[in-house]
């Protein structure tokens, strides 16, 4: 019983291991064949033909009876012995072909790359302050355009040689473009604006050195105080003197002037009286003013804020209704306080002396402040208080 079991076990083990050994032997054989070196030149299949010509001429063909009959294929050439040369290490057989990977003991010299030239600080964009006594240089190049921005609109542009350069005006901007390929071309250009004159020299330069945009600023844009301090001080002094003289003339007119024909226009309210005395003209500029007088008969101060004068015409159909006259409405604001028991006069500028009489008349109105609150006083040519 034991012998039968042992024989069956050995038989099954042989059945399992034999295919495994066979597969391993086949793989090892294929690995050895893959490492076989292929000769650089094919073997000579035509004996006695050094040129390898498959159809040699009959003159030098060998005798078939003398050709040896090979009994078996020639064995592969054996590797040379130690005396033939240095031995090849085993690791050399696993290296990649030289056509794929190249190892260099010394790296090839890398050519030095010259540094790029530094860029210009302004980069072709410049800003200049206008100077009428200076000649500016514009640098332009072939196939490039140069723009000039002016502080004012250009009115006239004069080009020295219009066959070399082209100038176009677009308001405050002038475009300059060369229309020649001569690298030595140059000319001049003069630009007139409303209040300025600019003079230029236009020259050709190599590409990369031209001006792209040149902006001109007016001197007053940088310094306003130092333009002409003496003129500024004189102008201020004259304005102060003129203002003082005008104020004195107005006071004299208010004190001395009186209406040639008294106007019965008066308004009253809470101890305050408003009267239109008439019209007066300034001696210097012939301007016309309406002369008003405000009297404070109350016990508290009164502040005048606004005085108004309007012309009207009474309606024929509706008695008592006022139709306001066109362009006959004037008013002025004030900030003047009148003490109790005092009177003050005021001038109201008007464009003309309005007509009154018959159905036409004038209405006066004043707004002011008392301790009790705002006060409005009105009056017209009939002397009626409202």
Image (cartoon, rainbow, N blue to C red):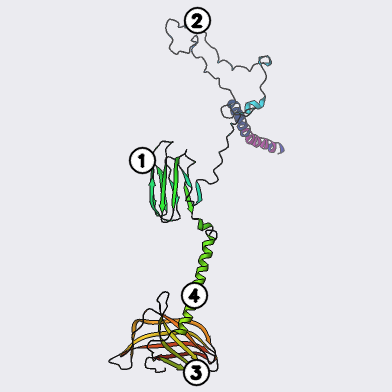
Q: Residue at x 50, y 7 (%)?
A: 67
Which of the two discs, 1 and 3, sits closer to the camera? 3
Question: In front: 134, or 114?
Answer: 134
Dots 1, 3 in contact, CB < 8 A:
no
Residue 163 marker: 1
Residue 66 marker: 2
**Location of residue 172 with respect to 280 vertically, above or below:** above
Among the two numbered marks 1 and 2 on one chain, the one whose residue lies closer to the N terminus: 2
**Location of residue 338 with respect to 134 vertically, above or below:** below
Circle 3 residue: 271
Measuring from the top left, give residue 199's x and y in whole percent: 44, 47
Question: In front: 181, or 167?
Answer: 167
Among the two numbered marks 2 and 3 on one chain, the one whose residue lies closer to the N terminus: 2
Residue at the extreme front: 256
Mark 1 secondary-structure assignment: loop
Mark 2 secondary-structure assignment: loop
Which of the two discs, 4 and 2, sits closer to the camera? 4
**Location of residue 143 with respect to 325 vertically, above or below:** above
Circle 4 residue: 245
């Amino acid at each position: 019983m034991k012998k039968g079991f042992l024989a069956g076990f050995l038989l099954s083990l042989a059945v399992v291991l034999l295919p495994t050994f066979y597969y391993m032997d086949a793989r090892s054989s294929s690995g050895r064949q893959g490492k076989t070196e292929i000769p650089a030149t094919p073997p000579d299949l035509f004996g006695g033909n050094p040129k390898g010509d498959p159809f040699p001429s009959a003159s030098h063909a060998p005798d078939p009876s003398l050709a040896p009959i090979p009994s078996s294929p020639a064995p592969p050439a054996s590797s040379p012995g130690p005396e033939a040369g240095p031995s090849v290490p085993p690791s050399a057989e696993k290296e990649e072909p030289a056509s794929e990977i190249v190892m260099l003991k010394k790296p090839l010299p890398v050519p030095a790359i010259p540094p790029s030239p530094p860029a210009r600080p302004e980069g072709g964009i410049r800003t200049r302050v206008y100077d009428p006594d200076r000649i500016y240089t514009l640098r332009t190049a072939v196939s490039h355009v140069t723009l000039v921005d002016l502080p004012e609109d250009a009115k006239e542009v004069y080009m020295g040689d219009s066959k070399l350069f082209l100038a176009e005006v677009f308001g405050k901007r002038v475009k300059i473009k060369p229309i020649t390929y001569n690298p030595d071309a140059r000319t001049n250009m003069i630009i007139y604006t409303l209040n300025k004159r600019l003079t230029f020299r236009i020259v050709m330069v190599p590409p990369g050195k031209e001006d792209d945009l040149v902006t001109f600023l007016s001197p007053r844009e940088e310094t306003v105080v130092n333009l002409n301090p003496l003129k500024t001080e004189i102008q201020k002094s004259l304005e102060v003197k003129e203002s003082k003289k005008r104020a004195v003339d107005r006071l004299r007119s208010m004190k001395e002037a009186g209406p040639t024909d008294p106007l019965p226009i008066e308004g009253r309210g809470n101890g305050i009286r408003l009267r239109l005395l008439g019209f007066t003209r300034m001696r210097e500029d012939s301007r016309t003013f309406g002369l008003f007088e405000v009297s404070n008969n109350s016990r508290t101060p009164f502040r005048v804020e606004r005085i108004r004068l309007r012309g009207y015409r009474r309606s024929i159909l509706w008695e008592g209704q006022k139709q306001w006259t066109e362009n006959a409405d004037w008013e002025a604001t004030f900030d003047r306080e009148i003490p109790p028991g005092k009177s003050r006069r005021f001038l109201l500028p008007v464009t003309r002396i309005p007509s009154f009489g018959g159905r036409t008349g004038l209405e006066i109105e004043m707004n002011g402040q008392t301790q009790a609150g705002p006060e409005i006083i009105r009056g017209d040519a009939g002397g009626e208080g409202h």
